[in-house]
Image: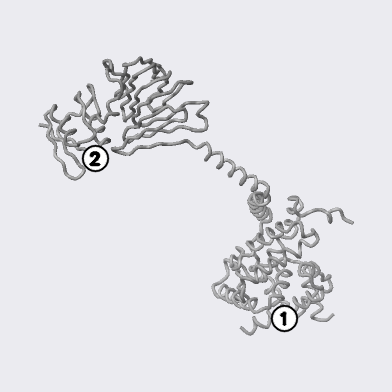
Amino acid sequence: MNKQLYKNICEESIFSSIFKKYAKDLHNFLYYKYGEKLNPQDKVQEAFVKLWENCAKVTPEKAKSFVFTTANNLMLNEAAHQKVILKYRTTNPKTYTNENPEFLMQENEYYNKLQNALTNLTEAQREAFLMNRIEGKRFKEIAEILNISTKAVEKRIYGALEKLRKDIKEL
Amino acid sequence: MKRDELILKWLNNELNKQELEAFKQLEEYNDLIQLDRSLQAFKTEDFNTDSELNKVLTTIKSFKKSGKSRISVFMRVAAVLAISFSLYYYTTTLDTTYTTDFAEKTLIELPDHSSVNLNANSSLVFNNKNWNKIREVQLNGEAFFKVSKGSSFEVKTKSGVVTVYGTEFNVKHRKQFFEVICYEGLVGVTFNSHETKLKPGDSFLILDGKIIAKEKEKELEPSWLNNESAFKSVPFKYVVSELERQYGISVVTDNIDTNQLFTGKFTHNNLDIALKAITLPLHITYSKSNDIITLTGE
């Protein structure tokens, strides 16, 4: 048995290492699932403060699911079925500056379509798909984060891709 | 290989060379690449793990501190006990205070049967509990003491300390005015850390911080005990404020040099006679309206 299993999260060093291990994933997960309007950063803070308050009760191996569940619940309390709108940054690389105005307009249009299409995905599809595409996470890693099977991740991501392409064509 | 298998492998980043070529041949290849590139614009802002960790740790630490006070039930009980004990101690050893208002005099008996006559608008504070060890009173105003024999007896005022070696004496401490007259026995007055000993009939007067020499006192006790206030070469303003104290009135002066010296006395029983007593010698006229007396010089 790993010795760390018996260590307490109440120790600052243990707590810090858990934070370093999961905070970024948690933040990205919240962001892609709920958008940035609901302050994913704050939720990460709150969830870890809650972890600290319960440090005596939560074992280190349960810590991950504890903070994910807590943060997700905090989000749900506020989300109240708001439309999730992800921000995109149109700061294009310099090579694009020579493009003609028509191209730029088309590109902008494409971004808008994509934004709408992302909004129309289900939360489950969006979180899995964007973690894969933007954060470059493998199916297996996503499955671990979401506590679901790799097959389910595959399904979600593939479904998301098909839906996006269909939506973009139609819009 | 089937189309969706290729796409899945692409998604999971595990295409080999041959598969990659096949993937590139798919009709949707361009669409997928454009989509993929555009998606990067939706990337979340960088999450700074270290600074976020610091934030959490600060929150937790501020929280820890407030947590401490929560834990220490024992400390709370101890605090309650300490407060109640000190309250008990404070109330049982509380100083006793006597205060007289305008136009009021009172006779106080101290724990050792020494007696104090307190003149108008004065206050006397002493501690009952420690009386056997320290005979000490704090005086603000004017009082006549008859001290019974025993250990030394001290009268503290803001201007100076009067030490008694057993006997009768009068202490008057008003604004800028500090006077001690000894009637019997021996009295020491400490002013500016210098002690002056007074024998019967001697008096000690400080006006505006200066020591004023006075002639021997012939009376056996201060005149105010017989409801009269007597003055010998005292600036007129102190006479006026004594009048205000004895009758509970307020006096306004008009065109009068209040620093001129006054010798004489006034009674405490009749305001008209008292007013005449202090105004006639100085050629001053007075008028009364309600409780305000106006003195007008010529």
Corner quadrant of residue A24: bottom right
Check disc 1: other Cα within 10 Å, few if <14, some if 14-19, many if 20+: few
Which is more toward the observer, B287 or B120? B120
Side (left or right) of B150 relative to B271 = right
- SS at badge 1: helix
Which is more toward the observer, B281 or B70? B281
The residue at which mark 1 appears reads as A162
Residue extending furthest front?
B113
What is the x, y in percent for residue A68?
Answer: 72, 66
Residue extending furthest right?
A1
Q: Is residue B22 visible?
A: no
The residue at which mark 2 appears reads as B249
Which is more toward the observer, B107 or B3? B107
The answer to whether tags 1 and 2 share a subunit is no
Q: Residue at x 16, y 30 (%)?
A: B277
Q: Amino acid at mark 1?
A: Glu
Quadrant (top left, top right, bottom left, bottom right) of the N terminus of chain B? bottom right
Q: Amino acid at mark 2?
A: Ile
- B251 vs B7: above or below: above
Residue extending furthest bottom?
A170
Instruction: Give the Cα distance between marks 1 and 2.
Output: 100 Å
Side (left or right) of A34 relative to B137 = right
Q: Is label 1 or label 2 in front?
A: 2
What is the x, y in percent for residue B213?
Answer: 28, 16
Side (left or right) of A149 relative to B288 = right
